[in-house]
Amino acid sequence: MRKNIVAGNWKMNKTFQEAEELIDRIVVGMEDTSLKCELIICPPALYLEVASDYAEESRLSVGAQNVSEHEKGAYTGEISAPMLDSVDVEYCIVGHSERRKYHGETNAQLAKKTDLLLDYGIRPIFCCGEVLEEREKAIQFNVVKKQITESLFHLSADEFSNLVIAYEPVWAIGTGKTATPEQAQEMHAFIRNLISEKYGKNIADEVSILYGGSCNPGNAKTLFSNPDVDGGLIGGASLKADDFLKIAQSF
Ligand code: PGA
Protein backbone atom coordinates (compact mmCIF):
# COMPACT_ATOMS: atom_id res chain seq x y z
CA MET A 1 0.00 0.00 0.00
CA ARG A 2 1.38 3.40 -0.94
CA LYS A 3 2.06 5.46 2.09
CA ASN A 4 4.35 8.20 3.20
CA ILE A 5 7.45 6.84 4.85
CA VAL A 6 10.43 8.41 6.58
CA ALA A 7 13.20 5.91 7.27
CA GLY A 8 16.39 6.62 9.18
CA ASN A 9 19.52 4.84 8.05
CA TRP A 10 21.89 5.11 11.00
CA LYS A 11 24.73 3.42 9.12
CA MET A 12 27.66 2.52 11.43
CA ASN A 13 26.97 5.07 14.14
CA LYS A 14 26.12 5.05 17.87
CA THR A 15 27.19 2.88 20.78
CA PHE A 16 24.57 0.73 22.48
CA GLN A 17 23.81 3.38 25.12
CA GLU A 18 23.62 6.16 22.54
CA ALA A 19 21.37 4.04 20.35
CA GLU A 20 18.96 3.32 23.17
CA GLU A 21 18.85 6.99 24.08
CA LEU A 22 18.12 8.00 20.49
CA ILE A 23 15.37 5.39 20.09
CA ASP A 24 13.85 6.52 23.36
CA ARG A 25 13.86 10.17 22.27
CA ILE A 26 12.26 9.33 18.95
CA VAL A 27 9.54 7.25 20.60
CA VAL A 28 8.81 9.92 23.22
CA GLY A 29 8.81 12.60 20.51
CA MET A 30 6.36 10.56 18.43
CA GLU A 31 3.90 10.38 21.29
CA ASP A 32 3.26 14.14 21.16
CA THR A 33 3.21 14.40 17.40
CA SER A 34 0.57 13.50 14.89
CA LEU A 35 2.54 12.11 12.00
CA LYS A 36 1.21 11.62 8.50
CA CYS A 37 3.86 9.04 7.71
CA GLU A 38 5.26 5.74 8.88
CA LEU A 39 8.50 6.25 10.78
CA ILE A 40 11.17 3.57 10.45
CA ILE A 41 14.58 3.38 12.05
CA CYS A 42 17.34 1.20 10.63
CA PRO A 43 19.96 0.95 13.38
CA PRO A 44 23.03 -1.32 13.26
CA ALA A 45 22.06 -5.01 13.50
CA LEU A 46 23.26 -5.29 17.08
CA TYR A 47 20.50 -2.93 18.23
CA LEU A 48 17.60 -4.35 16.25
CA GLU A 49 16.19 -6.39 19.09
CA VAL A 50 16.07 -3.40 21.42
CA ALA A 51 14.53 -1.29 18.66
CA SER A 52 11.89 -3.97 18.10
CA ASP A 53 11.04 -3.94 21.81
CA TYR A 54 10.42 -0.21 21.58
CA ALA A 55 8.46 -0.66 18.36
CA GLU A 56 6.14 -3.13 20.03
CA GLU A 57 5.05 -0.44 22.46
CA SER A 58 4.85 2.44 19.97
CA ARG A 59 4.13 3.42 16.37
CA LEU A 60 7.79 3.11 15.40
CA SER A 61 8.83 0.55 12.78
CA VAL A 62 12.19 -1.18 12.55
CA GLY A 63 14.38 -2.03 9.61
CA ALA A 64 17.80 -3.60 9.14
CA GLN A 65 20.53 -2.09 6.99
CA ASN A 66 21.53 -5.27 5.22
CA VAL A 67 20.88 -9.00 4.99
CA SER A 68 22.85 -11.97 3.73
CA GLU A 69 22.02 -13.37 0.31
CA HIS A 70 22.15 -16.84 1.94
CA GLU A 71 19.49 -18.30 4.17
CA LYS A 72 21.83 -19.96 6.69
CA GLY A 73 25.12 -21.76 7.12
CA ALA A 74 28.86 -21.14 7.09
CA TYR A 75 28.94 -17.42 6.28
CA THR A 76 30.93 -15.90 9.12
CA GLY A 77 29.78 -12.46 10.17
CA GLU A 78 26.59 -12.48 8.12
CA ILE A 79 23.02 -12.00 9.32
CA SER A 80 20.18 -13.86 7.62
CA ALA A 81 16.58 -13.03 6.79
CA PRO A 82 15.20 -15.61 9.28
CA MET A 83 17.38 -14.05 11.99
CA LEU A 84 15.94 -10.61 11.23
CA ASP A 85 12.47 -12.09 11.22
CA SER A 86 13.08 -13.72 14.59
CA VAL A 87 13.54 -10.29 16.20
CA ASP A 88 10.48 -8.84 14.42
CA VAL A 89 12.29 -6.69 11.89
CA GLU A 90 9.75 -5.42 9.36
CA TYR A 91 11.95 -3.75 6.74
CA CYS A 92 15.47 -4.13 5.37
CA ILE A 93 17.52 -1.78 3.22
CA VAL A 94 18.85 -3.59 0.15
CA GLY A 95 21.56 -2.35 -2.17
CA HIS A 96 22.54 0.85 -0.47
CA SER A 97 25.22 2.54 -2.58
CA GLU A 98 27.75 2.09 0.24
CA ARG A 99 27.17 -1.68 0.10
CA ARG A 100 27.46 -1.64 -3.66
CA LYS A 101 30.67 0.41 -3.50
CA TYR A 102 32.55 -0.97 -0.47
CA HIS A 103 31.26 -4.54 -0.57
CA GLY A 104 30.91 -4.98 -4.30
CA GLU A 105 27.26 -5.98 -4.13
CA THR A 106 25.91 -6.83 -7.56
CA ASN A 107 22.41 -6.60 -8.98
CA ALA A 108 22.23 -10.42 -9.00
CA GLN A 109 23.12 -10.64 -5.29
CA LEU A 110 20.55 -7.98 -4.49
CA ALA A 111 17.92 -10.04 -6.30
CA LYS A 112 18.69 -12.97 -3.97
CA LYS A 113 18.54 -10.76 -0.89
CA THR A 114 15.20 -9.37 -2.01
CA ASP A 115 13.80 -12.88 -2.55
CA LEU A 116 14.87 -14.07 0.89
CA LEU A 117 13.44 -11.04 2.62
CA LEU A 118 10.11 -11.48 0.89
CA ASP A 119 10.12 -15.18 1.81
CA TYR A 120 10.32 -14.14 5.45
CA GLY A 121 7.75 -11.37 5.20
CA ILE A 122 10.29 -8.55 5.54
CA ARG A 123 9.76 -5.59 3.22
CA PRO A 124 12.86 -4.61 1.23
CA ILE A 125 13.72 -0.92 0.88
CA PHE A 126 15.52 -1.23 -2.43
CA CYS A 127 18.07 1.51 -3.13
CA CYS A 128 19.00 2.68 -6.59
CA GLY A 129 20.78 5.73 -7.95
CA GLU A 130 23.53 7.01 -10.17
CA VAL A 131 26.99 8.32 -9.34
CA LEU A 132 28.02 11.85 -10.34
CA GLU A 133 29.87 10.78 -13.45
CA GLU A 134 26.79 8.97 -14.71
CA ARG A 135 24.61 12.03 -14.19
CA GLU A 136 27.15 14.20 -15.96
CA LYS A 137 26.97 11.82 -18.91
CA ALA A 138 23.17 12.03 -18.67
CA ILE A 139 22.84 8.23 -18.35
CA GLN A 140 21.16 8.29 -14.90
CA PHE A 141 17.89 6.86 -16.22
CA ASN A 142 19.62 3.91 -17.85
CA VAL A 143 21.60 3.23 -14.69
CA VAL A 144 18.53 3.18 -12.45
CA LYS A 145 16.56 1.15 -14.98
CA LYS A 146 19.29 -1.51 -15.06
CA GLN A 147 19.50 -1.67 -11.26
CA ILE A 148 15.75 -2.11 -10.90
CA THR A 149 15.30 -4.44 -13.86
CA GLU A 150 18.14 -6.80 -12.94
CA SER A 151 17.39 -7.01 -9.21
CA LEU A 152 13.61 -6.79 -9.08
CA PHE A 153 11.82 -7.57 -12.31
CA HIS A 154 11.85 -11.33 -11.76
CA LEU A 155 9.31 -10.77 -8.94
CA SER A 156 5.61 -11.40 -9.32
CA ALA A 157 3.29 -8.41 -9.13
CA ASP A 158 2.16 -9.54 -5.69
CA GLU A 159 5.72 -9.71 -4.44
CA PHE A 160 6.60 -6.39 -6.01
CA SER A 161 3.80 -4.62 -4.19
CA ASN A 162 5.63 -5.34 -0.90
CA LEU A 163 8.66 -3.31 -1.91
CA VAL A 164 9.67 0.19 -1.04
CA ILE A 165 12.01 1.88 -3.51
CA ALA A 166 14.55 4.51 -2.46
CA TYR A 167 16.08 6.71 -5.13
CA GLU A 168 19.40 7.89 -3.77
CA PRO A 169 21.63 9.78 -6.20
CA VAL A 170 25.07 8.78 -4.92
CA TRP A 171 26.44 12.31 -5.41
CA ALA A 172 23.89 13.58 -2.89
CA ILE A 173 24.61 11.06 -0.13
CA GLY A 174 26.39 12.60 2.84
CA THR A 175 27.64 15.46 0.66
CA GLY A 176 25.20 18.20 1.65
CA LYS A 177 24.28 18.40 -2.04
CA THR A 178 20.63 17.56 -2.52
CA ALA A 179 18.89 16.71 -5.76
CA THR A 180 16.58 19.56 -6.71
CA PRO A 181 12.89 18.82 -6.21
CA GLU A 182 12.63 18.71 -10.03
CA GLN A 183 15.45 16.18 -10.34
CA ALA A 184 13.88 14.02 -7.64
CA GLN A 185 10.39 14.19 -9.15
CA GLU A 186 11.71 13.47 -12.64
CA MET A 187 13.48 10.28 -11.50
CA HIS A 188 10.65 9.15 -9.23
CA ALA A 189 8.16 9.54 -12.07
CA PHE A 190 10.53 7.60 -14.33
CA ILE A 191 10.75 4.78 -11.77
CA ARG A 192 6.99 4.67 -11.30
CA ASN A 193 6.50 4.55 -15.04
CA LEU A 194 9.02 1.73 -15.32
CA ILE A 195 7.07 -0.24 -12.71
CA SER A 196 3.83 0.57 -14.47
CA GLU A 197 5.12 -0.76 -17.80
CA LYS A 198 6.10 -4.04 -16.16
CA TYR A 199 3.41 -4.57 -13.52
CA GLY A 200 0.60 -2.20 -14.47
CA LYS A 201 -0.56 1.13 -13.13
CA ASN A 202 -2.28 -0.24 -10.02
CA ILE A 203 0.90 -1.78 -8.66
CA ALA A 204 2.98 1.25 -9.68
CA ASP A 205 0.61 3.57 -7.85
CA GLU A 206 0.88 1.46 -4.71
CA VAL A 207 4.65 1.47 -4.35
CA SER A 208 6.20 4.08 -2.07
CA ILE A 209 9.24 5.72 -3.64
CA LEU A 210 11.51 7.52 -1.17
CA TYR A 211 14.19 10.09 -1.87
CA GLY A 212 17.57 9.87 -0.13
CA GLY A 213 20.62 12.10 -0.17
CA SER A 214 21.27 15.00 2.21
CA CYS A 215 17.61 15.28 3.10
CA ASN A 216 17.18 17.49 6.18
CA PRO A 217 14.53 19.44 8.10
CA GLY A 218 15.13 22.43 5.80
CA ASN A 219 14.55 20.73 2.45
CA ALA A 220 12.26 17.80 3.29
CA LYS A 221 8.99 19.66 2.77
CA THR A 222 9.84 20.79 -0.77
CA LEU A 223 11.13 17.37 -1.71
CA PHE A 224 8.15 15.50 -0.25
CA SER A 225 5.62 17.85 -1.87
CA ASN A 226 6.34 16.30 -5.27
CA PRO A 227 3.61 13.94 -6.44
CA ASP A 228 5.91 10.92 -6.84
CA VAL A 229 8.07 11.46 -3.76
CA ASP A 230 6.52 9.50 -0.91
CA GLY A 231 9.09 10.28 1.75
CA GLY A 232 12.76 9.93 2.48
CA LEU A 233 15.58 7.64 3.44
CA ILE A 234 17.58 9.78 5.82
CA GLY A 235 21.20 9.27 6.79
CA GLY A 236 22.97 12.00 8.79
CA ALA A 237 19.83 13.83 9.87
CA SER A 238 18.33 10.63 11.33
CA LEU A 239 20.97 10.57 14.05
CA LYS A 240 19.34 13.46 15.92
CA ALA A 241 15.85 12.83 17.23
CA ASP A 242 14.69 16.43 16.72
CA ASP A 243 15.85 16.61 13.12
CA PHE A 244 14.45 13.21 12.29
CA LEU A 245 11.06 14.06 13.77
CA LYS A 246 11.02 17.44 12.01
CA ILE A 247 11.59 15.66 8.70
CA ALA A 248 8.74 13.29 9.54
CA GLN A 249 6.49 16.30 10.16
CA SER A 250 7.14 17.64 6.66
CA PHE A 251 4.03 16.07 5.13
P1 PGA B 1 22.48 11.22 3.96
O1 PGA B 1 22.42 9.65 3.64
O2 PGA B 1 21.09 11.64 4.35
O3 PGA B 1 23.47 11.35 5.08
O4 PGA B 1 22.93 11.91 2.71
C1 PGA B 1 21.32 9.07 2.99
C2 PGA B 1 21.54 7.60 2.83
O5 PGA B 1 22.69 7.18 2.61
O6 PGA B 1 20.61 6.80 2.93
Image (cartoon, rainbow, N blue to C red):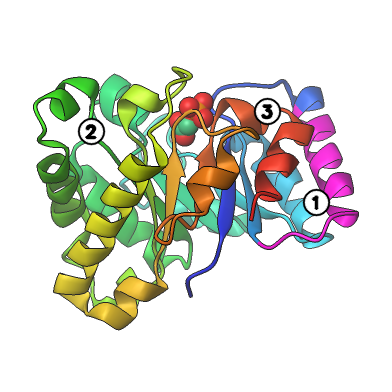
Q: Residue at x 44, y 51 (%)?
A: 210
- Region rendered in magenta: 19-36
How much space separates mark 2 and mark 1, taking CA atoms? 35 Å
Q: Quadrant of the C terminus?
A: bottom right
Question: Of discs 2 and 1, which sits in the foreground?
Answer: 2
Report whether residue 83 is seen: no
Numbered label attached to residue 54: 1
Left or right, 212 with reference to 139: right
Badge 2 crowding class, 10 Å Cα cut-off, few under 14, some 14 to 19, many 20 or more, is many
Numbered label attached to residue 239: 3
Q: Residue at x 35, y 44 (%)?
A: 182
Viewer-proximal residue, 183 or 188? 183
How much space separates mark 3 and mark 1, taking CA atoms? 17 Å
Tell me: is circle 2 under 8 Å from ligand 1: no
Left or right, 243 with reference to 83: right
Q: Main secondary structure of the magenta part?
A: helix
Badge 1 crowding class, 10 Å Cα cut-off, few under 14, some 14 to 19, many 20 or more, is some
Look at label 3 and name its amino acid.
Leu
Disc 1 element: helix
Query: Which of the two discs, 3 and 2, labels the residue nearer the N terminus?
Result: 2
Q: Residue at x 15, y 50 (%)?
A: 145
Numbered label attached to residue 130: 2
Report whether residue 104 is seen: yes
Q: Residue at x 10, y 44 (%)?
A: 142
Q: Percent position (x, y) of residue 31?
A: 88, 55
Badge 3 crowding class, 10 Å Cα cut-off, few under 14, some 14 to 19, many 20 or more, is many
